Amino acid sequence: MFHLIPDDLAQAKEKLAWLKENGYETSTITSVTNDMTKDGVQDMLDVALEGPYFGTKWEKPGQVLLITDATGAKICQVLPRQGFTSFLADLENNNILYWRNLSAQVSQAIGSD
């Protein structure tokens, strides 16, 4: 459960409960969603590029995620959908559109449609 990337808000809440039961008392739904976003984007990059050639790091946790090249230089920013101030708010509104938004931004970053 620790390394699984949740698919939706219900799974994020389930992971949060598991974390709290297993010694991660400071975990919050925001921290789980931030990990979900970062890990999900990283997984999309790794699959699309067939390896860990690009990375991810937070510019502003929960709000602005960076995609970086192999040297750590910024390629682009990944943002929540328009009208949402955080990835958590985006996910709470609609998990399918949350993932489509991330996928579209990853595709644009790597130059594929």
Image (tube, rainbow, N blue to C red):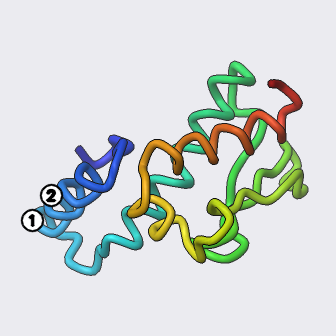
Q: As drawn, is 71 to the left or to the right of 60? A: right
Query: Where's residue 26, x and y in %?
Result: 27, 80
Q: Mark 1 points at which residue?
A: 21
Q: Residue 50 appears in which quarter of the rendering?
A: top right
Q: As drawn, is 109 to the left or to the right of 100? A: right
Q: Which residue is rendered at x = 36% and y = 42% of the image?
A: 7
Q: As drawn, is 55 to the left or to the right of 17? A: right
- The amino acid beneath tag 2 is Trp
Secondary structure beneath dot 2 equals helix
- Is 99 in front, or is 20? 99
- Is 37 in front, or is 53? 37
Is residue 70 shown above or below 10?
Answer: above
Q: How far apart are marks 2 and 1 (CA)?
A: 5 Å
Residue 46, disc: none
Secondary structure beneath dot 1 equals helix
Q: Which residue is rendered at x = 88% and y = 49% of the image?
A: 71
* The furthest residue to the left: 21
- The amino acid beneath tag 1 is Glu
* The furthest residue to the bottom: 26
Q: Residue 72 appears in which quarter of the rendering?
A: bottom right
Is residue 47 shown above or below 85?
Answer: above
Quadrant location of the N terminus in the rendered image: top left
Query: Where's residue 68, x and y in %?
Result: 81, 51
Q: As drawn, is 20 to the left or to the right of 78? A: left
Quadrant location of the C terminus in the rendered image: top right
| Mark 1 neighbour class, 10 Å CA radius: few under 14, some 14 to 19, many 20 or more | few
Q: Name the residue under label 2.
A: 18
Pointers 2 and 1 in contact (C-beta within 8 Å)? yes
| Mark 2 neighbour class, 10 Å CA radius: few under 14, some 14 to 19, many 20 or more | some
Q: Which residue is rendered at x = 38% and y = 63% of the image?
A: 92
